[in-house]
Amino acid sequence: QVQLGESGGGVVQPGRSLRLSCAASGFTFSNYTMHWVRQAPGKGLEWVAVILYDGNHKYYADSVKGRFTISRDNSKNTLYLQMNSLRADDTAVYYCARDLQSGYNYVAYFEYWGQGTLVTVSS
Amino acid sequence: EIVLTQSPAALSLSLGERATLSCRASQSVSTYLAWYQQRPGQAPRLLIYDTFNRATGIPARFSGSGSGTDFTLTISSLEPEDFAVYYCQQRSNWFTFGPGTKVDIK
């Protein structure tokens, strides 16, 4: 069965960096576009970034553009999110999510989700 | 950015009742709309995509309808596990979510 497991969250001071990982199993990772979605405590969902199946195309929400970098290692079935210049409003549970559709024409519906990892930005 | 508005913000219903949740988009999203369920302490779960297609394993009591700017998620007869928060999401112009509707037990 499809499994996604995030790690790397924690407490970090404003302005510092953190890297999240998402280990995938139960499907052919290299065939699927992957996303990061976050949820601030007690709030709704916000899409953060997407990376296509081959890693050649990446797109970001305006709120993180220039500060966050999404990447993947298909040989390790792992998705990453490098977060730099962190701010208090980046505090959230970060979920990795698999796209509903395989291949180049992703649909940006989030079919499978990990359990999330909490990032707290605080001095 | 396309803004999604959900109504009501909260809904109190009894087991077996019908739930009707609304999602309105600030501009047309065609039929590129999905619904997710999130139970407390859990990740969201995809219920419906492209307005009316049920995701794998989703019971038939969940149905979606609409097009353009107005969409509805209907739960025909509430089961105990259906009490949760429901989010709509569009993919017509980048990807945004609505603020959610909480369905709780009356």
Image: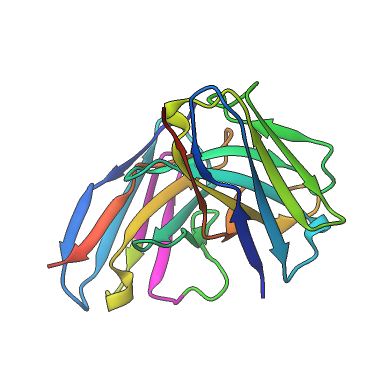
- Residue B83: where, in percent of width, then height? 28, 67
Q: A44 left or right of A57?
A: left
Name the residue: 58% across, 54% down: A110
Q: Is residue B60 above or below residue B89?
A: below
Name the residue: 57% across, 59% down: A114
- Asked whether A33 or A84 is in front, the reply is A84
- Residue A14: where, in percent of width, then height? 49, 24
Q: Is residue B68 a member of the stretch shown in magenta?
A: yes
- Residue A85: where, in percent of width, then height? 58, 23
- Asked whether B55 or B45 is in front, the reply is B45
Q: Quadrant of residue A59?
A: top right
In which quadrant of the rendered image does the N terminus of chain A lie?
Answer: bottom right
Whether residue A122 can be seen here: yes
Whether residue B27 can be seen here: no
Q: Is residue B11 above or below residue A46?
A: below
Q: A60 left or right of B104?
A: right
**What span is colored magenta in the figure?**
B59-73
- Asked whether A45 or A75 is in front, the reply is A75
Q: Is residue B55 a member of the stretch shown in magenta?
A: no
Q: Main secondary structure of the magenta part?
A: strand
